[in-house]
Amino acid sequence: MKIYVPLDSMAKALGAEDVTHAIVKEACRQGHKIEIIRTGTRGMAWLEPLVEIDRGDGRVGYGAVTPNQVSAMLDGSLESLGRVEDIPFLARQTRLTFARCGVIDPLNLADYEAHGGLVGLKRAIAMSAADIVEQVKQSGLRGRGGAGFPTGVKWDTVRQAQAERKYIVCNADEGDSGTFADRMIIEGDPFSVIEGMAIAGLATGATHGFVYIRSEYPDAIKIMSAAVDLARINRILGTNVLGSGKAFDMEVRVGAGAYICGEETSMLNSLEGKPGVVRAKPPLPALQGFMGKPTVVNNVISLATVPVIFEKGAAHHASFGVGRSRGTVTLQLAGNVKYGGLFETAFGITLGETVMDIGGGTRNGRPIKAVQVGGPLGSYLPVEKFDTPIGYEELGAEGGLMGHAGLVVFDDTTNMLEMARFAMQFCAIESCGKCTPCRVGSVRGVETIDRIAAGDHEAPALLSDLCELMHDSSLCALGGFIYHPVMSAFEHFPDDFSTTKEAAE
């Protein structure tokens, strides 16, 4: 009997370790011969810990298992979910990047290869650097960290740069509220990130890489570090990658948890041992990045998708999506939502279908008031915007922001003035302090929203002017994009801002 139990942080937080201990104890009592295989999560939060058992005729799932259910689960008297792949939430997905998550042991290289791993790297080794870059361009892959910059164009800039050393940096400083895709792929399929970075190295001439992981992800740090060691032992990394005669090695670095280090230049400063403060651009990191050398900085999901492109072909990846948003988007449903978790699908699904159909509406059954798309710098979109397709330009046309594709759901009891204040206060707390518009403007923004709440009729116009100034003159997206949540709350939910002190009295 093979028993699959997730070791993902989400599953562990919901009791996976206690369930694992109970399985071992109960199997011994019942006389079962078992093999426990630890996997990543399938991404369905409401079913964790999700245990799967293969008694010789395929894997069958048991959801939200507790230790006191283990005995019935092992003797077959506990009702199962059937094949996990048939659960509607999972069956409706198009899993490219996350195809192996929850399926394989994340640190079993043979398991990784048996499910398509290293096919892409082997094909890339046989190609020229220019041809590798061209494949990435044709795939339509864009930065999944939020900016949406074409990955192939960034790689080509570094490829053509002249320098004695170049670098690949994976930005795993996942600080956006309601997002967990980076952590989920690192804890469930870390070799895909390593393979993607090795392909990036071949494409650009970079010989060394870094994975920059936030300190709040101890399990991800542990798993990625172990995966790098295994990759080096098996010659996926090192001076002779898979016998190609080409070199690429990498290491894991841990950040201190500053939100601003999700911004690439702040992260590079931190990686160099300096304070995580934004750099002025130009020069671009692609030309003068880590230690002043040409550097590719890509998000975890961007790099983990690269092996799929080389395994299945650029045209296959480009066949999914809408407009200029090609491939799949890894939507992360959080907040007050019935079915929270990760849903990977082609770009183009509407916001309403995602939240109402896939997510099942609110967990408490109350009407939805707003959905924040794109993390703490994303807009609060009302139900009237639910027909908006999820794509970079499509969301942008509605004043939205793709960001890291996190969706946080709020019900009708939420006060949007308070949410606007929270966003501005977040900016004030997380600002690196380098530029005045962000450092000072965010503090003044909190004060201005408080004036609105107190009934100051001049404050709304001041808030609008302040957000416009911060947008136009901040050094990076933290101060520049804070207008998205603040002004979207102000414009879409004006009644929450008209609850003045005088009206309350």
Image (cartoon, rainbow, N blue to C red):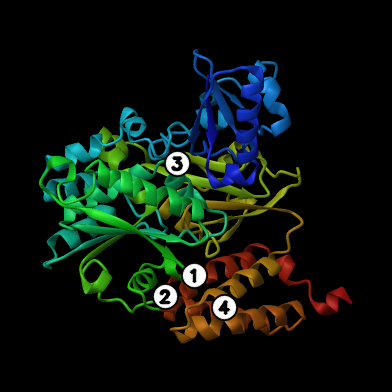
Quadrant in the picture for residue 172:
bottom left
Whether the residues at callouts 2 and 1 have beta carbons within 8 Å, the answer is: yes
Quadrant in the picture for residue 120:
top left
Disc 2 element:
loop
Give the CA separation, mark 2 to mark 4. Answer: 15 Å
Q: Considering only order in the chain, which callout, 1 or 2, is on the residue closer to the N terminus?
A: 1
Q: Residue at x 62, y 66 (%)?
A: 491
Q: Is residue 26 above or below residue 136?
A: above
Horizontal side of 431 relative to 275 (left or right) equals right
Q: Nearer the viewer, mark 4 or mark 3?
A: 3
Disc 1 element:
loop
Give the CA separation, mark 1 to mark 3. Answer: 24 Å
The image position of residue 170, as x and y in percent, is 34, 57
Q: What residue is disc 2 on? A: 276
Around disc 2, counting alpha carbons within 10 Å, would you say few (fewer than 14), some (14 to 19), or many (20 or more)? many
Q: What residue is disc 4 on? A: 428
The image position of residue 138, as x and y in percent, is 23, 44
Disc 4 element:
helix
Whether the residues at callouts 1 and 4 have beta carbons within 8 Å, the answer is: no
Give the number of the disc on residue 188. Answer: 3
Q: Amino acid at mark 4?
A: Ala
Disc 3 element:
helix
Q: What residue is disc 1 on? A: 258
Q: Considering only order in the chain, which callout, 4 or 2, is on the residue closer to the N terminus?
A: 2
